[in-house]
Image (cartoon, rainbow, N blue to C red):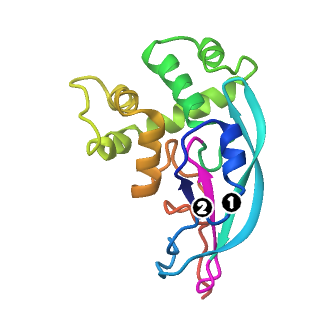
Amino acid sequence: MQILHPFAGSIQQYNEEIKDPDRYRPSCCPLCQTKHALTAHGFYRRTLVDRGIDTIIRVRRYLCAFCLRTVSLLPEFALPYFRFSVVVIGLFLVTRLCNGETLAAAARTAGLPDMPYQRGQQWIHRFRKQAAALTAALVSLTRPAAGGDFVIKALGMFEKTGWIRAHRFLLSELRMHLLGWPGFLAPSGRCRSLRPV
């Protein structure tokens, strides 16, 4: 399971601060809710693309001694299962869906001039599928604009609230993904599996 690291700053500052395993250690397991400190369980590496940056970051992992599952402390500017930061995806979506720019122009605005056409189409398709649920979820943070469709309302709510703050609320409180969980994952972010008969 991935939870968000309560850190707002640059990627370089994040890389320095994540070295201390005790500083952001969760006080209880978010999976089994057992009240005990989790054990530091190393890191995994993942790529992250932000405006003008394509780098590898380390993500701190913790192990629960009771349920024997790991919890990853993902930085709040990163989306689970996506290489691209929340801000880059948000900038692309606003440029394409609100401003009516072409996919290529939206990609350039987001700082991704070489982005494949299909990736932009996928982001738009997934966001459109999520727009009504995102609008309903973000009502507790801000009011939607009157009129328009759910896509425009959701984008306006993200802009008013701030993309990072809205993403933190959606993932931490509601276990919602900005672009919807991948098909192989349950909404909780855990792999789906069938029980044996």
Residue 113 shown left or right of residue 92 in the figure: right
Q: 135 above or below 4?
A: above
* Residue 33: % across, % down: 46, 78
* Residue 49: % across, % down: 70, 34
Observer-nearest of 67 and 119: 67
Observer-nearest of 39 and 124: 39
Residue 15 shown left or right of residue 140 in the figure: right
Observer-nearest of 152 and 141: 141
**SS class, disc 2:** loop
Please state the total of marks drawn on the protein image: 2
The stretch drawn in magenta includes residue 188: no
Residue at 69% across / 23% down in the picture? 117
* Residue 69: % across, % down: 64, 76
Quadrant for the C terminus, please: bottom right
Quarter of the image where one finds residue 150: top left
Quarter of the image where one finds residue 140: top left
Q: 34 above or below 107?
A: below
Point out which mark residue 185 bears.
Answer: none
Task: Please provide the residue range marked out in magenta.
Answer: 64-77
Quadrant for the N terminus, please: bottom right
**Residue labelled with disc 2:** 23
Quarter of the image where one finds residue 53: top right
Please name the amino acid that badge 2 sits on. Answer: Arg
**SS class, disc 1:** loop
Observer-nearest of 108 and 71: 71
Point out which mark residue 20 bears.
Answer: 1
Residue 162 shown left or right of residue 23 in the figure: left
* Residue situated furthest left in the rendering: 146
The stretch drawn in magenta includes residue 76: yes
